[in-house]
């Protein structure tokens, strides 16, 4: 390959920050002021020339390695220029579309390492080399603008799924099973001829699909993905789509194009896409380009020099540092603008600092204020001071950023730790009623010693997610002697408590038909037989699916179930009873009155109401909004055991 290069003047950098004794950078308070850059990093492609720019403050010299072919070793090496302290660049005057590249780093101690580009947006199979691509050529036909802004995050119903899980089972009827394209295949059917895949999502009525990691992760062989399974919380190339979900992982543009086709297909169906992002840690610090380009910079350390490990996987990224902060914001902006995503779910968000999360929120507001930001706001034992962590306890410092409301989940079904034996409201744990009712009020009167929620759009209300036992499996553990009917009733009650709460409702895929993972609680690397969504079960549990579909439709039909502020909630929602395994509240405005009853007892309970012509919208496991029967039997409402009843009247 013959190349013509453009050289910039060398910037003198006499005081190198590399510490020969520790093998890492000396991160002083002045480090970012001297070495951080606001320049665009990665490659800047034009058909006639491509500029490469890398931040590598540990390197004495850096060379660009351009490979002759994607999967062959012959390469051209070009020395890059340090244009400012720690920042190296070179411009190559040639059309480099689909050319693979890496960087070679020469350290002051004489060592040498080759790395992929931390800002890579395309890669060869298994992420071994970065690839230059003309992104305009990766767009599907009719790739258009962003979806119009969404109304309010409390209007959302989020459905979490995994690309592989959702269509991997033969019962899905999908041709491209476990692939981006399979997510949006139309007219797919279950064994009984019921809708599956994207048609099923449309029928269910969800507004957003939250997709578990779909960036490039390490522990699945992209060329033989069925050899091993992994959820993907082991980041490799943050800005590259995962190749195991593509029909051909060896072609860099295919995975980009097919992910865009998936997003486009969901958008065309009226469904928005939330991306699960994992900036809080990497899989292997020793081989990741973060550590090789800037050893000791990207991760927090304790006073004794050991890695901070609040994530539990050996490292915590230091989002409070300028170039980590920049990387996260740059990456989020890239996915938002290039892939037109509609939200981001932050794994272990409590590792990040408050300022970074707020800056993400402000940046996204400039693009589309309706983009949803949510995350796991756990207070993790990282070396960042507690008052700076993006935890639920500090939610009041992060407006319009939502947190998974673990307090609600635990109160409803019990804790998941220690084998999942802890019961909850639905399995007989006493004194949970008032706590659940408080959580259902979406931040109104919320105790500040538990969390800093101030508005309902800060609370993700859920009882099941990909982590821990499914709700069904938890019920099997807690109540092993229940018959199927009783277990289904407890399950519906739990889903009702979360879905009808003020806040942002969240459903785990298959929850609506009592998904089981055969009793396993952490299936991040269990086989497809455990993780795949079983569409036969969807056929077996039609009543449960119809019930959840009905609750979604009810929520979306009535703004009182999805109020946007605690001021509205204080005005229109009143808790009437919360004791003896009974929760009873009303929603009321100038035109409508709703009574909502939850019975956590195994036998019926009776509630007195005022006389009037009430419609019976929800009762004993059924939702009937089209032709509801009138409640004329008595002023005492009978609520069956382990069930929800909702009455409505026009005033």
Image (cartoon, rainbow, N blue to C red):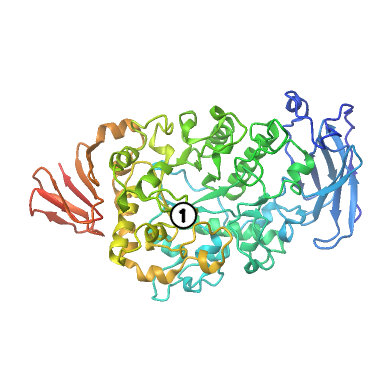
What x and y, as percent, mark residue 509? 45, 58
What x and y, as percent, mark residue 315? 66, 42
Residue at 53 percent of width and 45 percent of height: 344
Hey, which residue is sitting farthest top in the picture? 30
The quadrant where residue 444 appears: top left
Residue 155 visible somewhere in the drawing: no
Above/below status of 178 relative to 276:
below
In this orientation, which residue lies closer to the viewer: 71 or 635? 635
**Residue identifier under label 1:** 419
The quadrant where residue 562 appears: top left
Q: Which quadrant: the N terminus?
A: bottom right
In this orientation, which residue lies closer to the viewer: 500 or 71? 500
What x and y, as percent, mark residue 612? 9, 46
**SS class of the residue under badge 1?**
loop
Above/below status of 392 relative to 263:
above
Residue 481 visible somewhere in the drawing: yes
Q: Which quadrant: the C terminus?
A: top left
In this orientation, which residue lies closer to the viewer: 509 or 122? 509
How many numbered discs, if any? 1
What x and y, as percent, mark residue 380? 55, 38
Question: Mark 1: few, some, or many residues within 10 Å (few <14, many ≥20)?
Answer: few
Residue at 67 percent of width and 47 percent of height: 282
Left or right of 553? Residue 196 is: right
């Amino acid at each position: 390959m013959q190349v013509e290069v453009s050289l910039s003047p060398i910037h003198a950098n006499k005081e190198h920050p590399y510490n020969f004794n520790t093998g890492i950078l000396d991160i002083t308070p002045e480090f970012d002021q001297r070495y951080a850059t606001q320049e665009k990093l990665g490659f800047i492609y034009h058909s006639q020339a491509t500029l490469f720019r890398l931040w590598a403050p540990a390197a004495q010299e850096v060379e660009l390695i351009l490979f002759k072919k994607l999967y062959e070793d012959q390469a051209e090496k070009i020395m890059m220029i340090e244009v400012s302290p720690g920042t190296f660049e070179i411009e190559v005057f040639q059309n480099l579309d689909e050319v693979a590249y890496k960087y070679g780093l020469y350290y002051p101690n004489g060592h040498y390492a080759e790395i992929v580009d931390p800002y890579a947006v395309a890669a060869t199979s298994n992420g071994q080399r970065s690839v230059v691509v003309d992104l305009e050529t990766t767009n599907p036909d009719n790739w258009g603008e962003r979806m119009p802004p969404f109304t309010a995050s409390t209007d959302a119903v989020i459905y979490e799924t995994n690309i592989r899980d959702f269509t991997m089972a033969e019962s899905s009827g999908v041709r491209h099973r476990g692939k981006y394209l399979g997510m949006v295949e139309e007219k797919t059917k279950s064994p009984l001829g019921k809708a599956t895949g994207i048609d099923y999502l449309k029928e269910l009525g969800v507004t957003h699909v939250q997709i578990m990691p779909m960036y490039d992760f390490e522990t699945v062989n992209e060329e033989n993905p069925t050899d091993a399974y992994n959820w993907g919380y082991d980041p490799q190339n943050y800005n590259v789509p995962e190749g195991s979900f593509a029909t051909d992982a060896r072609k860099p543009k295919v995975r980009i194009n097919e992910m865009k086709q998936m997003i486009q297909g969901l958008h065309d169906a009226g469904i928005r896409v939330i991306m699960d992002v994992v900036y809080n840690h990497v899989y292997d610090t020793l081989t990741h380009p973060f550590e090789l380009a800037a050893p000791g910079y990207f991760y927090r350390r304790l006073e004794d020099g050991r890695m901070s490990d609040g994530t539990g996987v050996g490292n915590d990224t230091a989002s409070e540092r300028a170039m980590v902060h920049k990387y996260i914001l740059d990456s989020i902006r890239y996915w938002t603008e290039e892939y037109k995503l509609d939200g981001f779910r932050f794994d272990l968000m409590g590792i990040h600092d408050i300022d970074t999360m707020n800056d993400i929120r402000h940046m996204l507001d400039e693009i589309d204020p309706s983009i949803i930001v949510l995350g796991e706001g756990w207070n993790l034992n990282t070396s960042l001071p507690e008052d700076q962590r993006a935890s639920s306890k500090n939610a009041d410092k992060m407006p319009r950023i939502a947190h998974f409301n673990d307090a609600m989940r635990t109160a409803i079904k019990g804790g998941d730790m220690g084998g999942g034996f802890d019961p909850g409201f639905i399995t007989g744990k006493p004194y949970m009623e008032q706590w659940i009712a408080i959580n259902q009020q979406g931040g109104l009167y919320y105790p500040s010693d538990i969390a800093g929620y101030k508005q309902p759009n800060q609370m993700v209300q859920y009882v099941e997610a990909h982590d821990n036992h499914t709700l069904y499996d938890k019920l099997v553990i807690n109540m092993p002697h229940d018959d199927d009917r009783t277990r289904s009733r407890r399950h519906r009650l739990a889903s009702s408590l979360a879905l009808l709460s003020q806040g942002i409702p969240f459903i785990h895929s298959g929850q609506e038909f009592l998904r089981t993972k055969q009793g396993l609680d952490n299936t991040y690397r269990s086989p497809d037989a455990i993780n795949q969504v079983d569409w036969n079960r969807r056929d077996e549990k039609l009543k449960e699916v119809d019930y959840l579909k009905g609750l979604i439709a009810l929520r979306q039909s009535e703004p009182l179930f999805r109020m946007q502020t605690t001021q509205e909630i204080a005005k229109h929602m009143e808790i009437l009873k919360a004791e003896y395994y009974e929760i009873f509240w009303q929603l009321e405005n100038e035109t409508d009155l709703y009574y909502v009853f939850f019975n956590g007892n195994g036998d019926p309970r009776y509630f007195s109401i005022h006389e009037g012509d009430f419609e019976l919208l929800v009762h004993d496991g059924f939702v009937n909004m089209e032709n509801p029967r009138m409640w004329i039997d008595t002023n005492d409402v009978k609520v069956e055991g382990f069930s929800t009843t909702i009455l409505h009247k026009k005033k």
